[in-house]
Amino acid sequence: MRPYVLGLPRYANVAPLHHFLRLEGFRVLHAVPAELNRLLLSGEVGLSLVSSYFYLKHQDSLGLLPDFSVAVLGRVYSVNLFHKGALPHLARVALTTESATSVALLKLLLKEAGAGPRYERRKGGLELLSAYDGVLLIGDQAIKAYAALLPEVPETPHALPTRFGEVEVADLSTLWFQRTHLPFVFAVWAYRKENPPPKALVQALREARREGLGRLREVAEAEARRLGVHPLLLQHYLWNFRYHLEEPDRLGLKAFAEALGLPFAPAFYPE
């Protein structure tokens, strides 16, 4: 019998969910969110962290773990539009190829800001600013790009700058909070309704999250070594996330669905 497959992105912000994960009889498959979305639909993975935009588009066929999320209330630090010039005046924007949710959120926010840039999917980093007015980066790539601009890590995240010369950093989760005063849910655990995860796997994920959040400094230091950035920056980053899909997060997810003209009728995992 084939083992049940768990899909995981290799991003620092999900490390507290799996750093201490102990699996027996299950297999883990690592990929970027856009690829995990596809693998879940095809049945190649059974349970996966997927982008909230993907979940909302396919919620008729997907079940949802009721107490897991990757969400932020305010600044997220790793879903950033690095740009030159005011947002309403952006003409050309390069988009990450890794995430549908961040792209959908950016287009929504820029449209509301009065911007109508030409969007192009491009692989790359800050070097794209030589040809574009803005570049959307997410996850580890965004963290490393920001860290490369940062002259030093301040004692408090409130002092982290958002402007570096002519380059400004627009944090999409901050813009969402200013719009709604709600968290933004970037990812959820989803599965095909006909193939729910075994209870033992869900319990293992809950235990791993509990240990990961309780030992967050260890997780941050390990991820900082992997990315080659200052551990304090990673600790600032990780303690900002909401991992439990609580009522404010569900309201944020519903607000995102409504902004996209999509329904919100989740089918939660039966306990």
Image: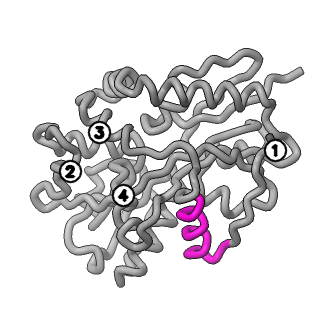
Q: Is residue 141 above or below residue 261?
A: above
From mark 4 to mark 3, how far is it between C-alphas?
13 Å
From mark 2 to mark 4, how far is it between C-alphas?
11 Å
Badge 3 or badge 1: first in the primary sequence: 3
For the point 46% across and 30% down, which residue is it?
213
From mark 3 to mark 2, how far is it between C-alphas?
10 Å
From mark 1 to mark 4, how far is it between C-alphas?
31 Å
Neighbourhood count class around disc 4 (C-alpha, 10 Å): few under 14, some 14–19, many 20 upward: many
From mark 1 to mark 2, how far is it between C-alphas?
40 Å
Q: Which marked residue is nearer to the observer: mark 3 or mark 1?
A: 1
Image: magenta residue range: 250-262
The answer to whether the residues at label 1 and label 2 have Cβ atoms under 8 Å apart is no
Residue pointed to by mark 3 = 236
**Closer to the camera in the image, 268 or 83:** 268
| Residue 254 forms part of the magenta stretch | yes
- Which amino acid, mark 2? His
State the image coordinates of residue 137 (x, y, percent, origin top left).
38, 52
| For residue 68, side relative to residue 150 (left or right) | right
The answer to whether the residues at label 3 and label 1 have Cβ atoms under 8 Å apart is no
- Which amino acid, mark 1? Pro
Badge 1 or badge 2: first in the primary sequence: 2
- Which amino acid, mark 4? Gly
Residue pointed to by mark 4 = 74
SS state under label 4 = loop
Q: Which mark is residue 270?
A: 1
| For residue 145, side relative to residue 49 (left or right) | left
Neighbourhood count class around disc 1 (C-alpha, 10 Å): few under 14, some 14–19, many 20 upward: few
State the image coordinates of residue 4 (x, y, percent, origin top left).
78, 28
Q: Which mark is residue 158?
A: 2
| For residue 125, side relative to residue 249 (left or right) | left
Q: How many marks?
A: 4
